[in-house]
Amino acid sequence: MATAVKGVDVAGNLTRDEAQERARILDVASYNVELDLTDSDRTFRSTTVVRFDCAEPGGSTFIDLVAPTVHRVVLNDEELDTAKVVSEGRITLPALQATNELHVEADAAYMRTGEGLHRFVDPVDGGVYLYTQFETSDAHRMYACFDQPDLKATFELTVFAPADFTVVSNTQPDVTGAPVEGAAAPAARWHFPASPPMSTYITALIAGPYHVVRDEHDGIPLGVYCRASLAPYLDAEAILDVTKRGFDFYHKLFGLRYPFGKYDQLFVPEFNAGAMENAGAVTYLEDYVFRSRVTDARYERRAETILHEMAHMWFGDLVTMRWWDDLWLNESFATFASVYCQAEATQWKDAWTTFANVEKAWALRQDQLPSTHPIAADIPDMQAVEVNFDGITYAKGASVLKQLVAYVGVDAFFAGVRTYFAEHAWGNTRLADLLGHLERASGRDLASWSQEWLETAGVNTMRPEFEVDEEGRFTSFTVVQEASAEHPTLRSHRLAVGLYDWTEAGILRRERVELDVTGERTPVDELVGLLQPDLVLVNDDDLTFTKIRLDERSLRTVIDGVGEIAESLPRALCFSAAWDMTRDAEMAARDYVDLVISGIGGVSDVSVAQMLLRQATAALHSYAAPEWRDTGFSLLASRLRDLLTGAEPGSDLQLAYAHAFAEAAADNEHLSLLQGLLDGAITVEGLTVDTDVRWALLRRLVVHGKAGEKEIAAELEADPTATGERHAAGCRAAIPTADAKAQAWERIRSATDMANTEFRATLVGFADPAHRELYRPYVGKYFDLLDEAWRNWTGEFAQSFVEIAYPSHIVEEDTVRRTDAYISEQDPPPALRRLLVEGKAGVERALRAQRKDAQSAD
């Protein structure tokens, strides 16, 4: 008898203990999966044959499957009663033999959440597109499996699909689109032979009328895919150029050829993340297919993503973590390797500057939250790992790996990596396995390094402390290392101190001293007797992961002339120091905004410029005293207006200024300029007001009540695409009326009626920081909905709701009290508690910063 399963959207929360027990007794050999995608637009038939051994015959275990209906479960030729063995995403498997064969037939559900097998209908041409997203453990939404990384097996797939579909999986198909006789509608069969052993989360299926560009490099078949309606915008040549450079670089660096045969890259709709490293079939956010002109920073980010996912083919796919405690081994290594490759093998030679400005800023922010954790984290269950794809796991880990490379030497580091790949290919590892190979290659004991950097949380702060004589020469100079009371570890750092002076050629480095910093105070005797410079930069060249502070004279130099710092990396580090000081309420938000306003004109690196402008806008929303906020936005918008009209026509900086101006405009004068740009009454030489710019202009006009439903509908009519629908949903939720907010809230409450991208866009528009008073009536409703959302929505939807709808812009003690009360009264699950504590910490930080900013006006 078939069993219909209630609560099909919510997968089970596998624990580490359960996974370890399954891995102890099971050895999984193979999956043979057959899918029929031709019958329904809601479900698909999934048939799985699993072959596995059991070390304890007579015992029992369970296999994972989330499906609306389970038709049959046959274990070793014995049919099991589905009503008894199927429950809450699991199928109990009793009386196991030494060697077992399991057959499971089910109707699985297409998803609209970006998890499992996601289904999308293109509003442009009606094309149906499917793709999978299985990390961390959603493979069992498509087929029955032991869904944990250390139970690797081969994966063979047969797919029955509509005749117009192209189907892609981890291996090259040996049957491609063979007609199916007697089918109700034209259908075709595709067969993918067994893959090498791999974890379930990197198995993949992508299907639909995808457009493809094919190529080959160094014997590797390459494919670049996107939806048919996006084909005119696909710059496959540029994507393939980065891909080929990446393969050449990694082959030399890793000493091992790409292990998965062919390499397809697929840009898919409504993707939740940047990309996913499915073996041989990498999926990407299709926003990386640029419909409108974008700055070089977006191309740089896309290249980093391409190289990140490619690095995963070795580090993550070929050699895989045993459990999610070592997620950082995947993500930190891929982040470090991708930036290293960018700087060495592509046109983006300043990739480490971008890393310092973007990734490290993310890491520093995350590492100062109450929920910070060691890089090598403790992950007791799947809900814990789902909130751990954070700035620690990616960016701090990559920063620390960069330090490790400097510590053991680049040649020794990659020699260790090469022997690590050779020994553990197709297997699973722990942190100790990698460290062992690095120790043998370098001759260094890494136990204390690992304890300091990987097994403790928190970030240190470095301050220069010095005295000068009447001639202005240093009589003493000390680097002071600090740690927070919550995370008091003082670490060993290799860093440099740079001395910079004003010159006719700008602010240039005069002196550099590199040293080891240990403990609370480290004297720098080499600087004694030297003239005090205009700027003292601790952690020059960004050698270590730390916050830095500027002395009074250095801070004044930065405020007055940051744009005059000749080199991009020290300039980025100075901006980063000022931003840290602002977030820590050591520098007034208005001073940081003034710093950006005065210095932005001297910043030629567009990725740095965009980051600074985003931070200045964030400072005004969260850290500026409310009574000064409007003044600050007016000052920033005026500066951006002047930069926009004065920039080199058609330049990347001009485009960056246009988008930043659209985010900052708030008063009638600046909103009128936006309206003129949108309707064509005002033009700026070189600026093309294309689709993306139009939506940005309209969004700001809507937020401030200068446009509404009529204008949104007209824009959507001009851009009737999936991206246009997403923008329109965000704009409608951002209409500043009580009725519009009420309608948006009802849409949010009925989350399962929306696709993931529309849901997030609605959340962002609903919680726009300019609408604090309109949002205030929903604070209580937010807390009332939390429990239901966390229990009944998928992980992606629940986490998006908790984070985006949190009343972070109601910067008041009452927000803190409400959060504490909810946590105290409801005792939420650890992952939900973490997200709430992070939201509360942001409000507490904003309260401190706003007090600092208000005091600066006295």
Image (spheres, rainbow, N blue to C red):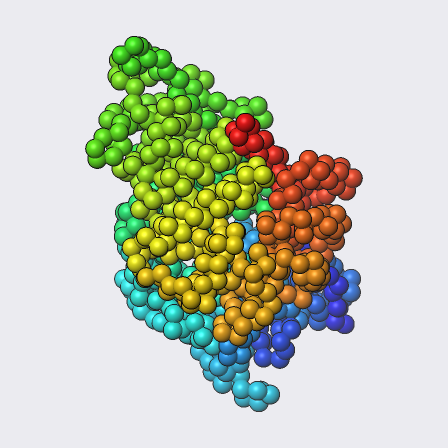
> Is 514 above or below relative to 793?
above
Residue 349 left/right relative to 29: left
Q: Which of these two is toward me, 548 or 220?
A: 548
Direction front: furthest residue: 669
> Residue 509: where, in percent of width, then height?
26, 29
Does 365 appear above or below 516?
below
Residue lying furthest left: 504
Left or right, residue 207 beside residue 771: left
Name the residue at 43% across, 55% down: 659
Task: Say which quadrant the C terminus sits in.
Answer: top right
Q: Height in image: 238 above or below 41?
A: above
Left or right: residue 512 compared with residue 151: left
Which residue is more in the foreground, 510 or 836?
A: 510
The residue shown at (45%, 45%) is: 636
Residue 432 visible in the current orientation: no
Q: What is the total number of numbered labels drawn onto the structure image?
A: 0
| 796 vs 706, nearest the viewer | 706
Q: Residue at x 51, y 24 (%)?
A: 483
Q: Residue at position x 43%, y 33% from top? A: 578
Residue 106 seen in the figure: yes
Front-lying residue, 450 or 855 = 855
Residue 149 at x, y percent in the picture: 54, 51
Measured as percent of width and height from the top left, residue 678 is found at: 46, 65
- Figure quadrant of residue 419: top left
The vertical placement of 775 against 398, above or below, is below
Q: Quadrant of the N terminus?
A: bottom right
Snapshot quadrant of residue 242: bottom left
**Residue 612 on image: x %, y %:** 42, 43
